[in-house]
Image: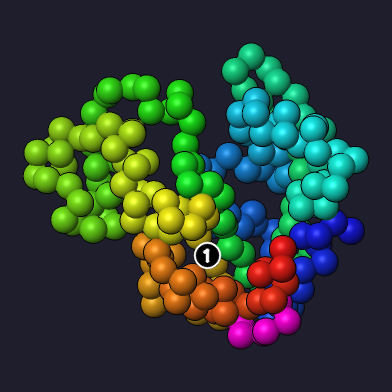
């Protein structure tokens, strides 16, 4: 078993029926379960390269089990283990690493996008003007604002999404910026289990 499968924090069991849907707390809906404990994720070429490069290294245990990948034109996919397979009511947290969480090619366009303005408006109405709400904002503006709003810029990681079958956090994870808020989220995720929380810290 890899490190992910050994973390007890991912095994919150409080039901009698296995999940048959695919639980995803963030991202763009690019996951698909194909068989048993395996899912296919549509991604970018760099992610496939990363999975290939860590196989057999000390870093491999920090990744889901890798069953191969392929590239067909611009579409790249990887086959990885479904970390929630066999769990009844899993608690799932999506953490995004890095002080900069977007690619250069993602922000080269100067096109104004009303959909991104609406996303920021949903987080905080003061973040966008009425003109921006109508005309849109660039992808670069959106990404940089997201990083400033969260803990990415200062700490190099943020919580992008969290699902727990036993309740909800009072603070939106996407707006968590300081130590106290992040600790609160980790304690909530681990149900105040100090042994599990220490595993996060030591990882």
Farthest left residue?
130
Question: According to the image, label 1 marks what residue?
Answer: 162
Query: Looking at the image, which residue is at 16% across and 56% down?
Result: 126
Compared across the picture, whether 109 is left or right of 102 comes to left
- Up-down: is 76 above or below 64? above
Compared across the picture, whether 135 is left or right of 19 comes to left
Can residue 148 be seen by looking at this rendering? yes
Quadrant of the snapshot with the N terminus: bottom right
**Which residue is nearer to you in this view: 160 or 80?**
160
Compared across the picture, whether 28 is left or right of 86 comes to left
Q: Please say whether residue 192 is one of the residues in the magenta stretch.
A: yes
- Up-down: is 54 above or below 109? below
- Percent position (x, y) of residue 157? 52, 55
Q: Please say whether residue 107 is one of the residues in the magenta stretch.
A: no
Query: Looking at the image, which residue is at 72% across and 34% down?
Result: 50
Please report the bounds of the magenta region as a residue range: 191-196
Secondary structure state at the residue bearing disc 1: strand
Label 1 environment density (alpha carbons within 10 Å; few <14, some 14–19, many ≥20): many
- Up-down: is 203 above or below 46? below
Compared across the picture, whether 65 is left or right of 43 comes to right
Q: Quadrant of residue 123?
A: bottom left
Can residue 35 be seen by looking at this rendering? no
- Percent position (x, y) of residue 158? 49, 57
Query: Looking at the image, which residue is at 79% across and 33% down?
Result: 53
- Percent position (x, y) of residue 55? 85, 38
- Percent position (x, y) of residue 70? 75, 24
């Amino acid at each position: 078993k890899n490190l992910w499968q050994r973390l007890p924090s991912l095994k919150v069991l409080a039901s009698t029926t296995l999940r048959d849907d695919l639980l995803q707390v963030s991202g763009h809906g690019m996951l698909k379960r194909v068989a048993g404990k395996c899912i296919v994720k549509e991604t970018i070429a760099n992610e496939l390269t990363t999975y290939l490069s860590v196989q057999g290294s000390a870093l491999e245990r920090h990744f889901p089990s890798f069953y191969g990948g392929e590239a067909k034109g611009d579409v790249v996919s990887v086959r990885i283990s479904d970390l929630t397979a066999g769990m009844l009511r899993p608690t799932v947290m999506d953490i995004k690493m890095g002080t900069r969480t977007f690619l250069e090619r993602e922000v080269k366009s100067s096109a104004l996008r009303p959909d991104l303005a609406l996303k920021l408006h949903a987080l905080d109405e003061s973040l966008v003007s009425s003109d921006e709400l109508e005309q849109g904002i660039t992808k670069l503006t959106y990404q940089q604002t997201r990083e400033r709003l969260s803990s990415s810029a200062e700490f190099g990681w943020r919580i992008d999404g969290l699902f727990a079958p036993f309740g909800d956090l009072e603070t939106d994870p996407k707006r968590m910026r300081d130590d106290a808020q992040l600790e609160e989220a980790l304690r909530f995720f681990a149900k105040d289990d100090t042994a599990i929380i220490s595993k996060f810290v030591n990882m």
